[in-house]
Image: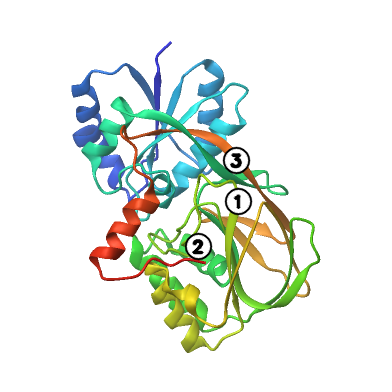
Amino acid sequence: MKKYFMIINPTAGGGRVKKQWPEIIKPLIDEIGIDYDFEFTSYPHHAIDIAKQRVSEGYEIICAIGGDGTANEVLNGVLKADKKGIFAAIPLGSGDDIPTVFGIPEKDLNAAIQCLVNGSNLSFDVGYCVNADRYFAGAASMGFDAEVANRANRSGKKRKGAKNYQIAVFETILKFRPYDLKITIDDQDPIQARRMLLAIGNGTRYGGGMHICPAASVQDGIFHTTALKKVSRFTLLRLFRLIYDGEHVYHSKVETFQGTKFFVESVANKCLYQADGEILGFLPETFITKPRGITVRVPDPWISYSKIWEKRLQLKGKKIPIY
């Protein structure tokens, strides 16, 4: 039995992966000389089925080659298999938030391949959506940003990359209305208020580098969450610009919470929620953390994403958000 299995999404990166696999990626992997098999995905959620099957067959390391959608599906397939597998990724999407929060190199194909071949295996936290039966690595959210993700996903065939998400923000903001959300944290008394959004962070970021939950860590066993109370459209737009450096947490209308279990319901209107950019349905939903729930192939030596991001902020003269 071969050790590695590659799951390739040919449509990732605006179709870039389909061309790069035979011309660039496969030759680089073959040059190293590892023994592997591979398969292309051909329909939504196909990567879940492939990963689950290949882990059950005995492949040790299952590598997602594509964007965050591919990474999330492979991660779910690995975790739902009847044997223990190791998640790996060669990030080639427009966002790549999932591999990045685990410390897998982003925007560096050679480094990602070296990580796959010469890396080590570490365990990290994952989040879990109970009703949807779906794991997530980065963040789950509801309200404004879930509607943005839904719009961006629907427009993805026409608009590629980070600009698709940014355009979706502007389009959504024109019609958005806040939701009356009731949040129960670790079975405590519910907190209810009208909110623009709630993001539950296992990792720090989503949307291609938007640090929505800047204090989140994939190693601390808890969720760090960010909620935004009702604000004007202008303020909402301004806050989205601040999210990239995590500076939104200092705004008076931003609340932050911590916990291991969040039950969220929308009191009146139906409210979409998403996890790792994938729309999963409407609230209510229960979100729980699974400490050290996933084993990931990471660089050796490994540097946490928190340290990488802190260095980037320092170079920009920004302070590190703490809450």
Front residue of 65/291: it is: 291
Label of residue 270 in the image: none
Front residue of 225/317: it is: 317
Q: Amino acid at mark 2?
A: Cys
**115 sits left or right of 203 in the view:** left
Q: Which residue is mark 3?
A: 291
Q: Which residue is mark 1?
A: 222
Is 245 situated above or below 37?
Answer: below
Does residue 46 appear in this view?
Answer: no
Q: Which residue is mark 2?
A: 213
Placement of the N terminus among the 4 image quadrants: top left
Q: Residue, x 30% and y 26% (percent of image)? A: 117
Disc 2 to disc 1, how far (Cα)?
Answer: 12 Å
Q: Which residue reaches farthest top?
A: 1
Element type at marker 2? loop
**230 sits left or right of 68 in the view:** right
Q: Residue, x 75% and y 60% (percent of image)? A: 284
Element type at marker 3? strand
Q: Residue, x 71% and y 47% (percent of image)? A: 130
Q: Amino acid at mark 3?
A: Pro
Disc 2 to disc 3, how far (Cα)?
Answer: 18 Å
Q: Position of residue 308 (x, y in %)?
A: 32, 52
